[in-house]
Amino acid sequence: EAAQPGSGVDPQNRNRVMRRLEKLHDGDDGGAIFNTENGSAVLKNVTITNNISVNHGGAIVNYGALTLQSCTVTGNTSKSNGGAIWTNAGGSSVTITNTTITNNATSNDDTRGGAIYIESGSVAVTGKIADNTAKDGGAVFNNASGTLNLTDVFVHSNKSTQRGGGSITNYGTATLTDCDVWDNEAKTNGGAIWTGGAQADVTLTNCVVTGNTAELTGGGVCLYQGTLTASGTTVSNN
C-alpha cells in the first residue's frame, strides 16, 4: 500500500482517455485513480479491479470531472468510505454509463458506500450496481450536498452490515428512474433505501422495489426525514 494518492493514475490538470487498466497498485486515496479538481478523466471499456485504498475510494477518488463508459469496476476495497468511487467538491461530476459496479466493499467499522460515496457533487449512473458491501449504504451513500441520479439501473444484492440502506443511504437528492431494486439487505432500517435529513429528497419513477430485507423497519424504504415521491412504482414482497 502506497502513501501517495492514486498509485495508478493522477491526471494532474490534463485529460486522459484510458482503454484498459487492470489490477493497479494500492493507494492512500484512490487505489487506482486520483482525479484532481482540474482533471477530466474519461474511461472507456476499462476494467478496474482488485485495488485497495488505505483511505477513501478503493478504485477512484474524484474532485473533477469523471466519465466511465462501458466499464467494469469490481473487487475494489476502501478501508474508509467509497469501496469503488469517492467523489467530492461542489462542482465535481461523475457520469457512469452502461457500466457494471460489483463486489466492491468498505472494510473498517463505520464506513460507508460499498460502491459509491458522494461527499458532494453529482453522480449519474446507468448499468448495474450489485453485490457491494458497506457498514452503511451497501451500494451508495449520498450526503446532504450530493445529487444521485440512477436511470435504468439494476441495483441488487447489496448489503449494509451495521446500519441502514441496504442499497442506498440518502441525505441529499436521489432520483431513481426505470430502476429495479431487489434482494438488498440492511442490518437496521431500509432494506433497499434509507433516507434522512430535513432536506433529503427521494423520487422513484417507474421503479420496482422488491425482495429487500431490513432487520428493523422499512424492508423496502425507510423514510426517517425528508420527502419521498413515487409514481408508476411497485414496492412489494419486502
Image (cartoon, rainbow, N blue to C red):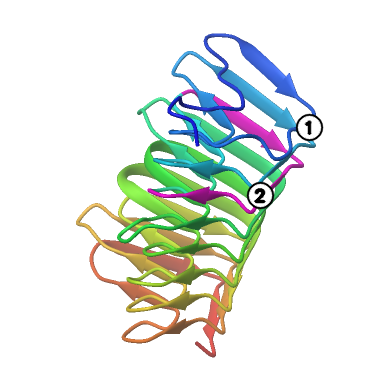
**Of 27 and 81, which appears nearest the observer?**
27
- Name the disc covering residue 1, or none: none
Q: Is residue 76 left or right of residue 53?
A: right
Residue at 58% across / 19% down in the picture? 40
- Name the disc covering residue 20, or none: 1
Residue 75 drawn in magenta: yes
Relative height, residue 18 to residue 230 (above, below): above
Magenta part of the chain: 64-80
**Of 170 and 33, which appears nearest the observer?**
33
> Which residue extends farthest front?
1
Residue at 41% across / 40% down in the picture? 56
Cβ atoms under marks 1 and 2 closer than 8 Å: no
Which quadrant of the figure has residue 196?
Answer: bottom left
Which quadrant of the figure has residue 188?
Answer: bottom left
Residue 52, how many percent across, how many down?
Answer: 53, 44
> Which residue extends farthest left?
198
Q: CA distance from mark 1 to mark 2?
A: 20 Å
Q: Is residue 65 left or right of residue 134?
A: right
Residue 186, how many percent across, how many down?
Answer: 41, 76
* Residue hosting label 2: 126
> Which residue extends farthest bottom?
237
Specify few, some or many for label 2: CA neighbours under 10 Å numbering under 14, 14-19, or 20 or more: many
Q: Is residue 94 left or right of residue 43?
A: left
